[in-house]
Image (tube, grey):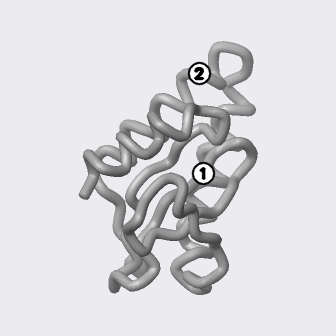
Amino acid sequence: MSPDYRVLPAVIDDIFGIWLFIAEDSVEAANRVESEIWDAFADLAQLPDRGHHRPDLTSRPLRFSLVYNYLIAYAPDEHPLLIVAVLHGMRSPRLMAAILRDRE
């Protein structure tokens, strides 16, 4: 069965960067966080309106959902659901907004 979502190529890089950062302390923890992020994509595809809007980050109709400290940015109106980014929630909002602009 194919997933009900798709990810931008940059999302793979986001997840790998997250994994590398966490794996410096614990590969087990890195694997767990990565798995939960992928599981969240599938959950969001089933209930895309569950996330919240962040007008401080983008005027696009994206929604955001949190997994640990990571914000998943996605387009709920796309079919299949489009995952745009996975960003650390403590990043500068200005930097997050710039990343999202680059991924239009």
Q: Is residue 69 above or below residue 43?
A: above
Q: CA distance from mark 2 to mark 1?
A: 16 Å
Task: Looking at the image, tell me whether mark 2 or mark 1 is earlier in sequence order.
Answer: 2
| Residue at (53, 42) in percent of width and height | 87
Q: Quadrant of the N terminus?
A: bottom left
* Front tag of 2 and 1: 1
Task: Read off the residue under disc 2.
Answer: 21
Q: Is residue 18 above or below residue 21?
A: below
Secondary element under disc 2, as helix, strand or loop, is helix
Q: Which mark is residue 71?
A: 1
Q: Is residue 36 above or below residue 48?
A: above
| Residue at (53, 69) in percent of width and height | 63
User: Hey, which quadrant is residue 99 in on the image?
Assistant: top left
Label 2 Cα crowd, 10 Å radius (few <14 / some 14-19 / many 20+) = few
Q: Is residue 3 visible?
A: no
The type of residue carrying mark 2 is Phe
- In-front residue for pair 84/7: 84
Place of residue 3 in the rendered image (x, y in percent of width and height, measured from the top left): 43, 76
Place of residue 44 in the rendered image (x, y in percent of width and height, measured from the top left): 58, 75
| Residue at (60, 38) in percent of width and height | 88
